[in-house]
Amino acid sequence: MPNDMTTDKPMKLMIGFTIPILIGNIVQQLYYVIDSIIVGQYLGVNALAAVGSTGSLTFLVIGWVMGMTGGFAIIIAQRYGAKDIKGVRHYVAMSYYLCIIMAVVLTVGLLAANRWILTVMNTPEEIMEDTYRFIRVIFMGLTATIAYNNLASILRALGDSKTPLYFLVLSSIVNIILDYLFIAGLSMGVEGAGYATVISQALASLLCFIYMAKKFPILSLNKEDAYFSGKSVKRLIGMGTPMGLQFSITAIGTMMVQVALNGLGPIYIAAFTACGKIQNIITQPFPSLGASIATYVGQNTGAGRMDRVKEGVRAGIIITLICSAVSMVAVLVFGDSLIRLFITDNSGGVLEKAKVYFYAVAGFYPALGFIYVYRNSLQGLGYGLLPMLGGVFELFARVLVILILAKPFGYVGICFANPVAWVSALIPLIPAYYYRMKKLNGNVN
């Protein structure tokens, strides 16, 4: 059922709302890890590199989807916080229209440009065909990905972070079973991993839709709610586009890193891929907390409770510092053991190359966490363009690191692209948040 976040203690609400999202995100990331382990163990290092080399491209596309649907959810959360149920239903209907259009455009465009994109990304010849076949399947299933992200975002906007978790856990279990069936049992190669992902996401989106129809009467749409409004669509696009661009700009920077990495060969790609999978798990508290902050700030902004917004952000900062310390210890102490899950032997020095990455980034996890605190707070306040500045600074930072450090320092230089980008993103985000809060408090007073 919907959850009102305009009452009760912010820290308690934040933790309670974040935990289900965190569990769901970890389950999803564990799936990605297990998927990579299955690919690496059954199909070899080149196949692992092929799947891993699509990570930045997938992030570009999925990040756009997450940003757009997350932007839609901010508007819905604000309407719910203002107790405007009619507005909630109307904006939900408009989000459906926009997602249908987005699914058609992205699917057709990306399938047509697939091989060209991989060529531009300097994908090594020895993994080109596997990479092409895997990402083609992912692109064909984008409708399911868009549907799940939009439905899950709507549920979270209404304060329900548990239901998306249940369906995500179920779909991840199905995903792993299908991975073994398609790869180990039916010998479908890397395409099998792609099909397993698409089918499981379709299941999650279907279950989400059925649940919402039965359990959320405030989302029962009628003809009046579903009327097409250019003004409403413009508002959703105005919030969603900057958030989508923010993810996409960040993804372009990671693609630049991937291009530089591709030039070093499959061994380096495999090491970087394994590190990325592990890092995505141990840093999941950050995006999970970010989703919580966006909903919390959105509802309290809609209710005019700016005092509670400040309290919630302070709580987010404290949680981030604690989680950062845990993440640093995790990669530095257990990193070796985790990397060994991905490889059957250490030929080519994959393990040593992975350790280099962990030592380069671990100390910068607080900066990564603060990005989600301040960026999502600004989004919850209703500002779409300001958070995008963080992504622009990230992009320039990654490009500069690649241009300056990649050639003289090789792999070591590339490893510093992420931490430098994280610190750079905070340069506009922190001042923007405090400046906007000062202005909003002045208007309230």
Image (spheres, helix red, strand yellow):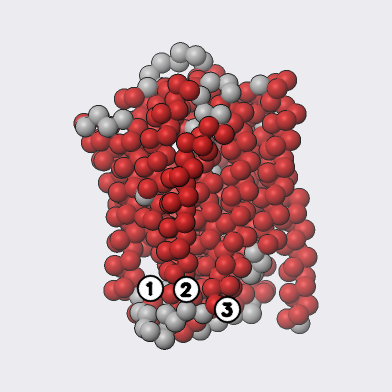
| Label 1: few (<14), some (14–19) or many (≥20) C-alpha neighbours in 10 Å | some
Q: Earlier in the sequence, mark 3 or mark 1?
A: 1
Q: Where does the image place residue 238, in percent across and percent down from the top left?
A: 61, 68
Q: Earlier in the sequence, mark 2 or mark 3?
A: 2
- 26 and 177: which is toward the camera: 177
Q: Secondary structure at mark 1?
A: loop
| Residue located beneath label 1 in the image | 1
Q: CA distance from mark 3 to mark 1?
A: 29 Å
Q: Secondary structure at mark 3?
A: helix
- 228 and 23: which is toward the camera: 228
| Residue name at image x 61 percent, y 33 percent | 257
Height in image: 100 above or below 408?
below
Q: Which amino acid type is shown beneath numbered disc 1? A: Met
Q: Which amino acid type is shown beneath numbered disc 2? A: Met
| Residue name at image x 75 percent, y 61 percent | 432
| Residue located beneath label 3 in the image | 231
Q: Earlier in the sequence, mark 1 or mark 2?
A: 1
Q: Nearer the viewer, mark 3 or mark 1?
A: 3
- 328 and 60: which is toward the camera: 60
Quarter-wise, where is residue 418 in the image? top right
Question: Are the two marked residues, 1 and 2, in contact with CB atoms closer than 8 angstroms?
Answer: no
Height in image: 262 above or below 288?
above
Q: CA distance from mark 1 to mark 2?
A: 22 Å
| Residue name at image x 42 percent, y 80 percent | 226
| Residue located beneath label 2 in the image | 94
Is 426 on the left or on the right of 16, as rendered? right
